[in-house]
Image (cartoon, helix red, strand yellow):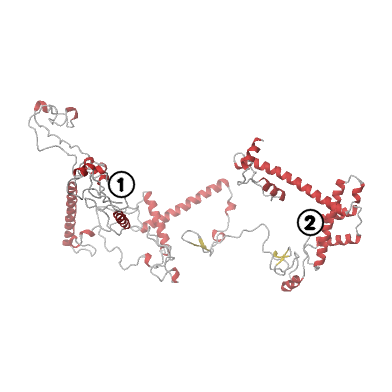
Amino acid sequence: MAYNSSSAPVSEVLRTKHEDVDEDEPKTKSREDWRKAKELEEARKAGTAPAAVDEEGRDINPHIPQYIASAPWYYGSRGPTLKHQRIQPEQKKPFSKPEEWYKRGVDTARVATKFRKGACENCGAMTHKKKDCVERPRKIGARFSGEAIAPDEHLQPKLDLGFDGKRDRWNGYDSNEYLAVVDDFQKVEEAKRQLKTEKLKQGQELGELPDNMVLDDDVPEEDEDKYVDDVDMPGTKVDSKQRITVRNLRIREDIAKYLRNLDPNSAYYDPKTRSMRDNPYKDVNKNPEEVDYAGENFVRFSGDTLKHGAAQVFAWDAHDKGVDVHVLAEPTKLEMLQKEFEKKKDEFKGSLTKNVIDKYGGEEHLKAPPKTLLLAQSESYVEYSRQGKIIKGNEKPVIRSKYEEDVFPNNHTSVFGSYWRAGQWGYKCCHSLIRNSYCTGDAGKQSNDSLEVVPSVSMDDEENIESDTKQLSESAVVVDTDSVSTQMDEAAVAGTSSSVAVKKTKSKNKKKNEKRKERKRRKASKKSSKRHSSSSSSSSSSSSSSSESDSEDEDAKKKKRLAKALKREEKRQSEADTLMDDRKRAYHSLYDVAAPTEEELEAYYMRRSREEDPMLQFLSKRSKKQ
């Protein structure tokens, strides 16, 4: 932006037109001048050139837009300035200064000696009337007595405070008023110091002072009562009048807990409670009894710590009940009270138990083994992390079933079902596929692995075979009796030997599968011939016509199933809104674990709505109208 552009008003230009001052006349800039001004502006924005300065010597931000930085022609600026954007002096509102505040008290400099007209009839002050007077009503007012004229109140100034002045909580505070508080405190401290010095001097005259007592002349003032503990706990007597000067609270050579082991994975230090419960030397393979600090858990749960803690709790409870006893001052008394309390407690419990047994009976059920035998001590070790998770020990017990587990009969070392081969279960120890067989070890593995296993025939296959054989016997088709008998024998062998390893070749398996497929074809052809036979010619149809009719029947069945599936899909889509609403749908409407069939999948894909289809909205509207 061009700050040096002239913005002189027209009247001034006309007035100075005939004068010799050429520099005030507006001159048209050449292209070179505009280029230099543009380069200077870019340099100022980049920071390579100094910023423009206004008439008051303040820098102007080069990033300010030109329509803000340029002053209007009637402002009469001679150079770059931002003064036209600031509050003008005539618009500034004067506010009261911080030292100005309301005057307190009354004006004692001038006191009237006689009653003045218009003054308070009670006290004689001119600044208020009788109804506003706060002085005690006189028996004879100042209007009639003319004596004891009260001084006038100060005429309060009218303060005009700004936003900060109205919200300043220390506005009008006089710091000199606090000097009186400081003086009073110093006088009290000086009196205490003199009284204490006199007491110590009297004791020194009678005899020598103890080693732990010194005169106040030898003690610096800032160390007095520095480490005094004024906590009044139950069972502790603290008198605020008797103060003790405690120095050297701890030895300076002591090592801080968090500096004993700088490893971040070592014992955790809690800065809030200043405690380190775990042993910081745990990973250093040091005996906790040999180190000078082994964690607070080691100190807390060793020796008579538990007994002392129980005694302290008992002392607090006794203090709450009104018995004045202290753990450290009267340990013998506390121990005797604790023993007596435990004895009476046991007697009371025993009397309660006896009364209940005498009233309801059942003493024979209480004759159980001692708890030391029922709840024997175990060596189970549990280790927790800082987050409370179990790291070691206390593993989750294995869920046992209602059947017997880990039972190995007939010399087996593994259970039946631990081995799988060719669609059959067996034993892993000997690779035997026969249940309740005797284990033969490694020799059995070699012999069983050398045998080829025939896949077992399921119950459905056996039923199909039996039905096929019945239909074959009833039909008029002549079938070779030898082949049927062989097939029946093979099916029977396959059904009975579902878990027996029989050595057979692959060619026999293929023949067996082909014969089974052929039976199924014959069965389907007979059903179709019975259903559609309207004349005797159908019984003498060729094998080719029967196969075509079979395919036609299958297609017709598939179409029927597809039509039913489409109807179900349309019904499901129409009820989709109710299924999404939990208040309208049935209780088990979403509970469907059956796998979809091929027809249901095809119906879903046929009726699925596609967002990219332009006819989707048209079809949806049409279906709603129907």
In the rendered image, residue 223, in percent from the top left (x then y), is placed at 23, 60
Label 2 is placed on what type of residue?
Answer: Met
Q: Is residue 369 visible?
A: yes
Tell me the SS state at disc 2. helix
Which residue: 34% across, 57% down? 330
> Split into 4 quadrants, where in the image is the C terminus?
top right
Of tags 1 and 2, the one toward the viewer is: 1
The residue shown at (24%, 63%) is 212
Residue identified by numbered label 1: 68
- Residues 156 and 143: in front is 156
- Residue 606 horizontal side relative to residue 163, left or right: right
Q: Amino acid at mark 1?
A: Ile
Residue 439 spot, x, y in % from top left? 73, 69
Relative height, residue 492 to residue 545 (above, below): below
Element marked by disc 1: helix
Q: Which mark is residue 459?
A: 2
- Vertical arrangement, residue 420 with respect to residue 357, above or below: below
The quadrant holding residue 468 is bottom right
**Which of pointers 1 and 2 lies earlier in the amino acid sequence?**
1
Image height check: is 397 above or below 439?
Answer: above
Q: Is residue 299 in view from this perspective? A: no
The image shows residue 187 at horizontal and vertical percentages of 17, 51
